[in-house]
Amino acid sequence: MCLKITKRLSIISASVLLSATSLPAQSEPTYISDNPFITEGYVQLQAGNAEVALEAFDKALETNAQELSALLGKAMIYAGQLNHEEAFHSYDSIIQQHPRHIDAWSGRGLAAFNLGDFDEALNSFEQATADQPVNGFYYESLAWTFMCRGEFDEAAATAKTATLMYGRKGENSIYPLLIAYFSYLEIGDTQAAQRTLIYAQKNRPVNQWPAPIVDYLSGTIDQTSLISYVMDSAQETEAHTYIGLKLKHDEQFEAAQKHLNWVSHHGDPRVFEQTLARTFQLRNNVATLAP
């Protein structure tokens, strides 16, 4: 069975962390608390009432400024609101108290990634994966970071690990394969890139996104057909990014720039590809200005 991996968004949603906020040594989720404000906060958060939840968590912190459940709740709210600076500081404050809280390290990394601080993102994701957790999303996030840093060998290797980790949990995500494919192209290893693309073609999800991206890269559909499959802003952002990267590899630089520019200025900021496109555009602009 091919499962859609919703956790690949470059923010951590409340629905994700509400099911994954436990410390390694704990058997109970960290949001369970005797504090009624914390209980109310998570009820409101699950109901989509972020501002009311934030008020509840703040009241809980008035009693105990180090209350982990409240700090996690606030961090998730900031991440969901795309307030990356506040999210980073919130997750960082959790790390100070709980240095092996890997979900907080991941959240910190995602906030840094979205802020374009790839040094802090790298440090955070390396901490999240230090104990080799069976979590494909952590490794995929690390691979995106390597790619944005221009460290394509590391990006490809980490993307392979992400694929293995997804598989060990019975999940399937094509995105690490896309990272590996373009990373191999960047370092000129066209054979490895082609092998990766063939593997992606065999393992792509049936009749669901992002299968059309793989079909486009494989040459079975064209740009127009790929765009026709788009159903929302996240998919539109992904489509234009991969069209741009393919055109860049094909040395159609002007056409590539149009797609990557669109993603940089109009793409959905919730997905990794938007930050990747901005990074490539910045790198290209610097290269153009260099004497």
Image (cartoon, rainbow, N blue to C red):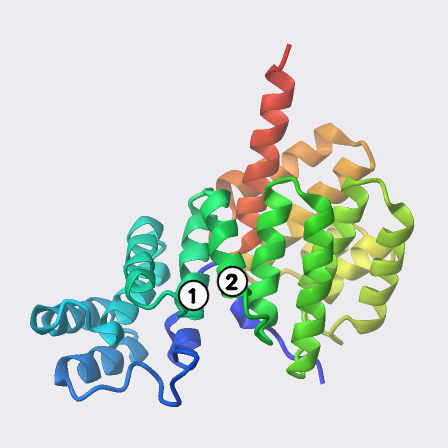
Residue 73, x across and y down, in percent: 28, 71
Q: Amino acid at mark 2?
A: Leu
Residue at the far top in the pictured view = 291
Residue at 67% from the left image edge and 70% from the top image edge: 173
> Which residue in the structure is indicated by mark 2?
9
Q: Amino acid at mark 1?
A: Ile
Image quadrant assignment for residue 54: bottom left
Task: Give the SS element for disc 2.
Answer: loop
| Residue 264 seen in the current view | yes
State whether residue 186 is above or below residue 41.
above
Residue at 61% from the left image edge and 70% from the top image edge: 136
Query: How busy is the neighbourhood of tag 1: few (under 14 within 10 Å), some, or many (20 plus)?
Result: many
**Relative depth, front residue between 212 and 190:** 190
**Relative depth, front residue between 113 and 95:** 95
Image quadrant assignment for residue 140: bottom right
For the C terminus, give its image quadrant.
Answer: top right
State whether residue 66 is above or below residue 34.
above
| Residue 268 seen in the current view | no
- In the rendered structure, the answer to whether residue 204 lies left or right of residue 69 reads right
> Which residue in the structure is indicated by mark 1?
12
Query: How busy is the neighbourhood of tag 2: few (under 14 within 10 Å), some, or many (20 plus)?
Result: some
- In the rendered structure, the answer to whether residue 72 lies left or right of residue 220 reads left
Residue at 49% from the left image edge and 43% from the top image edge: 119
Mark-to-mark CA distance, 2 and 1: 7 Å
Task: Give the SS element for disc 1.
Answer: loop
Q: Are marks 2 and 1 in contact (CB under 8 Å)?
A: yes
Residue 113, x across and y down, in percent: 48, 49
**Relative depth, front residue between 84 and 210:** 84
State whether residue 33 is above or below residue 265.
below
